[in-house]
Image (cartoon, grey):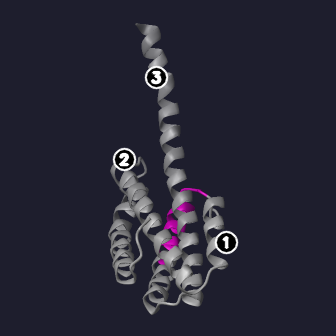
């Protein structure tokens, strides 16, 4: 029994460490996603045919820039270095958008924003509910209403444009 208790105690640092790693991953993923949203929002303002898509792109730049600043301050307070670029997958999505224009740009951007925001909401809900870092949980909780508003707005734009989420 003494050996079993000692084994459990030796696992505690691993559990704490893995929780810290997961929270740090949330910070990094949120930063990469925000950087990508800003880049794609800038593209939407330049290349979209629809004024609604252009306006949505401007909103993405504004809201995700503000969220990034809050996230950066939190990460710095925890000695977490955030990435300066989007993930490889996000860079690929940005590259695909760069070669499109007009209606094909609008459709691809709309579909991508729906998918991205659905995924972001799932990740932020998970962090808000089970993250170990109270600051990460609070950031996720505070950001969720904005993400929901973005998703609702882009879905309405999709419906108006006759664009399916797929």
1 or 3: tag closer to the N-terminus:
3
Q: Residues within 10 Å of mark 1 (few under 14, many from 20)?
A: few
2 or 3: tag closer to the N-terminus:
3
Residue 18's label in the rendered image is none
Outermost residue toward the top in this view: 1
Outermost residue toward the front in this view: 162
101 to 78, vertically: above or below:
below
Is 79 one of the magenta-colored residues?
yes
Nearer the viewer's eye, disc 1 or disc 3?
A: 1
1 or 2: tag closer to the N-terminus:
1
Q: Is residue 97 left or right of residue 20?
A: right
Residue 130's label in the rendered image is 2
Q: Is residue 134 visible from the viewing direction of this image?
A: no
Q: Residues within 10 Å of mark 2 (few under 14, many from 20)?
A: few
Q: Position of residue 112 (x, y in %)?
A: 50, 69
Which residue is at a point 55% across and 84% down the rendered structure image? Answer: 44
Q: Which residue is mark 1?
A: 95
| The N terminus, quarter of image | top left
Question: In this picture, which residue range is highlighted in magenta?
Answer: 66-80
Is 24 one of the magenta-colored residues?
no
Rounded to the nearest angstrom, the CA distance separating label 1 from label 2 is 34 Å
Outermost residue toward the bottom in this view: 51
Q: Secondary structure at mark 2?
A: helix
Q: Which residue is mark 3?
A: 9
Nearer the viewer's eye, disc 1 or disc 2?
A: 1
Rounded to the nearest angstrom, the CA distance separating label 2 from label 3 is 22 Å
């Amino acid at each position: 029994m003494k050996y079993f208790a000692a084994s459990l105690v030796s696992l505690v640092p691993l559990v704490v460490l893995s929780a810290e790693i997961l929270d740090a991953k949330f910070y990094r993923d949120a930063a990469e996603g925000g950087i990508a949203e800003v880049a794609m929002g800038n593209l939407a303002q330049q290349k979209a045919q629809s004024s609604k898509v252009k306006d949505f792109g401007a909103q993405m730049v504004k809201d995700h820039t503000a969220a990034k600043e809050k996230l950066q301050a939190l990460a710095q307070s925890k000695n977490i270095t955030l990435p300066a670029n989007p993930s490889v997958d996000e860079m690929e999505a940005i590259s695909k958008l760069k070669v499109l224009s007009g209606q094909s740009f609008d459709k691809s951007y709309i579909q991508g924003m729906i998918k991205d925001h659905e995924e972001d909401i799932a990740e932020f809900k998970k962090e808000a509910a089970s993250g170990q870092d109270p600051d990460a949980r609070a950031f996720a909780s505070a950001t969720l209403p904005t993400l929901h508003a973005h998703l609702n707005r882009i879905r309405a734009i999709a419906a108006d444009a006759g664009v399916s989420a797929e």
